[in-house]
Image (cartoon, rainbow, N blue to C red):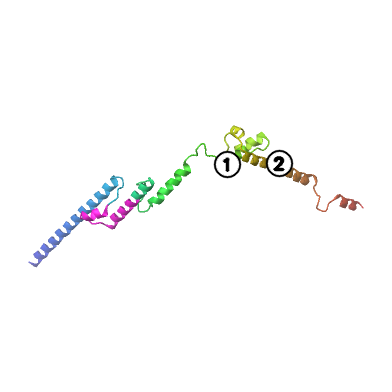
């Protein structure tokens, strides 16, 4: 009889364990359905209090998923940029992702027609005194049209700047020519080889 009683007890324990496993499986399926339903509705916030009220056990994974969904919803409401579903919500901060997306949009959007800085206008109006040099300079600087630079209206301030630049270029050109002539025509001067020294050698 002892063997039959022990076998009966083992069968009862096995039945209880089987029932517990079935209950756990049912609870996991319910939790997965809730998470899937929340993800299908566009990432709406999981309500942990509602899960507790419904009697389902809230695991740390579900609580974390609810918190991440709340952060994503907050970022979407504030910035209008949603984190793509292929990113791990636990690894990506939705607010920083939204900031990065805004910076990318600002970086890659084209400039508008009227957006020219004052320095860009000065570069376009720069005159080297020679049309070929002007054209070459504009090509190097990436200035598209040469007609606009010559025909645009020049105010008094930019006119003064242009005159100053022309004066600087003239001075630089004169200094360059003077230095070139000294290095090429007066070679050997100032190193102790003057004409008076050469006369001394002959004596």
How many other residues sit within 10 Å of disc 2, few (<14), some (14-19) or many (≥20)? Answer: some
Could you tell which of marks 1 and 2 lies nearer the N-terminus? Answer: 1
- Which numbered marker is on residue 170? 2
Q: Is residue 63 magenta?
A: yes
Residue drawn 18% across the image and 58% down it: 20
Let me know if residue 86 appears in the view: no
Q: Residue furthest right?
A: 203
Q: Is residue 26 left or right of residue 201?
A: left
Q: Residue furthest left?
A: 1
- Which numbered marker is on residue 197? none
Q: Which residue is mark 1?
A: 118
Q: Main secondary structure of the magenta part?
A: helix
Residue at disc 2, secondary structure:
helix
Where does residue 175 sit, x and y in percent of width and height?
A: 73, 45
Residue drawn 12% across the image and 63% down it: 9
| Closer to us: 50 or 1 | 50
Residue drawn 71% across the image and 41% down it: 170
Where does residue 111 sit, x and y in percent of width and height?
A: 50, 39
How many other residues sit within 10 Å of disc 1, few (<14), some (14-19) or many (≥20)? Answer: few
Q: Is residue 115 left or right of residue 138?
A: left
Residue drawn 80% across the image and 44% down it: 185
Quarter of the image with the N terminus is: bottom left
Give the Cα separation between the discs numbered 1 and 2: 24 Å
Q: Nearer the viewer, mark 1 or mark 2?
A: 1
Where does residue 53 sit, x and y in percent of width and height?
A: 21, 55
Point out the stretch of residues depicted in magenta. 47-71
Where does residue 127 sit, x and y in percent of width and height?
A: 65, 37
Q: Is residue 64 magenta?
A: yes
Residue at disc 1, secondary structure:
helix
Let me know if residue 15 appears in the view: yes
């Amino acid at each position: 009889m002892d063997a039959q009683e022990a076998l009966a007890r083992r069968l009862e324990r096995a039945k209880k364990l089987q029932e517990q496993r079935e209950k756990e499986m049912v609870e996991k399926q319910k939790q997965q359905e809730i998470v899937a339903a929340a993800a299908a509705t566009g990432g709406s916030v999981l309500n942990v209090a509602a899960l507790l009220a419904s009697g389902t056990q809230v695991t740390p994974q579900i609580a974390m998923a609810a918190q991440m969904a709340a952060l994503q919803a907050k970022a979407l409401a504030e910035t209008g940029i949603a984190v793509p579903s292929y990113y791990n919500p636990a690894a990506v901060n939705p607010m920083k992702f939204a900031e990065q997306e805004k910076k990318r949009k600002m970086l890659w959007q084209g400039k508008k027609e009227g957006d020219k800085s004052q320095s860009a206008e000065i570069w376009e109006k720069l005159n080297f005194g020679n049309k070929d040099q002007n054209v070459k300079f504009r090509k190097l600087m990436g200035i598209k049209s040469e007609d606009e630079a010559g025909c645009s209206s020049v105010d008094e301030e930019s006119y003064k700047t242009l005159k100053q630049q022309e004066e600087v270029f003239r001075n630089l050109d004169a200094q360059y020519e003077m230095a070139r002539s000294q290095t090429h025509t007066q070679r050997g001067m100032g190193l102790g080889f003057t004409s008076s020294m050469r006369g001394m050698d002959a004596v």
